[in-house]
Amino acid sequence: MTLRRTRAYAASGLVLAVCTVFAWQNATAAHNCHAAATPGVNWHECDKKLLILEGQDLSGANLFGVDFTSTDLRNSNLLAANLEKATLVRASLADSTAKGARFDRIEAYRTDFSRMDAQGAVFASAEMQRSNFQDANLTNVDFTKAELGRAQFHDADISGSRFSFANLARADFRGATFTASIDFDRAFFFLTRIEGVDLSNSAGLSQWQLNMACGDARTELPSGLTRPEDWPCQFQQE
């Protein structure tokens, strides 16, 4: 073996070793459950339950699969953060900013999203039974196939949002407002509270959905649909 070839092999080995070290360092830096809450932090599938993280800046963070059970995330910045498949059971995101954030397939039973600014966020296929969205800004939000049984939308702005195929059984939309069309295509409306809601500009609603829902004389409907004879629902009169 010539000296030149020996040096070439040595150099290539050194390059490989350096690349391996850098790759390990990058992987370690990219996934660190002990890292402080900072913009862009990577807490992929970390355990962050029962913590007080109020007012933290987690914009652009990778929070995929994080366990935030009962964690206080009030007033936090979650701008464009990725919370796909995160666990947010009984957590609080009240008054937080989450524009463009990803909440796909989260588990969020009894979670507090009140007054959250979530414009353009995605909650597709999320489990959010009994969650609170009161006074939240939910314009252009994607709730496709979300589980929203008994969720509260009182005084929320849902302009331009999509609830297609969502489970809205006993969800409460009283006081919700919207200035752009809402997509309710094939959403499940069993005892959904829509008293006093102006649905005249909504899309995808069918008579069978309204027949299961709970409206009243003040509920405005799209053209071609009629108020069921059993409105208001019996439990509303008790």
Image (spheres, rainbow, N blue to C red):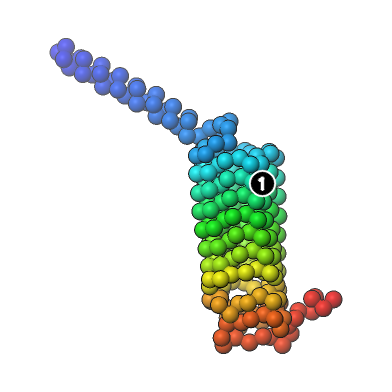
Residue 126 is drawn in which quadrant? bottom right
Does the image show residue 137?
yes
Q: Which residue is rendered at x = 80% and y = 75% of the image?
A: 235
Residue 204: x %, y % from top left: 53, 76
| Tag 1 secondary structure | loop
Front residue of this view, candidates 155 and 151: 155
Is 147 in front, or is 59?
59
> Dividing the image into 4 quarters, which one contains the C terminus?
bottom right
Residue pushed farthest front? 179
The answer to whether residue 122 is seen in the rendering is no
Residue drawn 67% across and 56% down?
A: 114
Residue corresponding to mark 1:
74
Place of residue 215 in the rendered image (x, y in percent of width and height, measured from the top left): 70, 78
Instruction: Give the vertical position of 204 relative to 48 (above or below).
Output: below
Residue 142 drawn at (x, y percent): 53, 62
Task: Residue at 65%, 68% (x, y): give it.
Answer: 176
Residue drawn at 61 percent across, 82 percent down: 221
> Height in image: 60 above or below 205?
above
| Label 1 packing within 10 angstroms: few (<14), some (14-19), many (20+) | many
Q: Which amino acid does label 1 sit on?
A: Arg
Quadrant containing the N terminus in the rendered view: top left
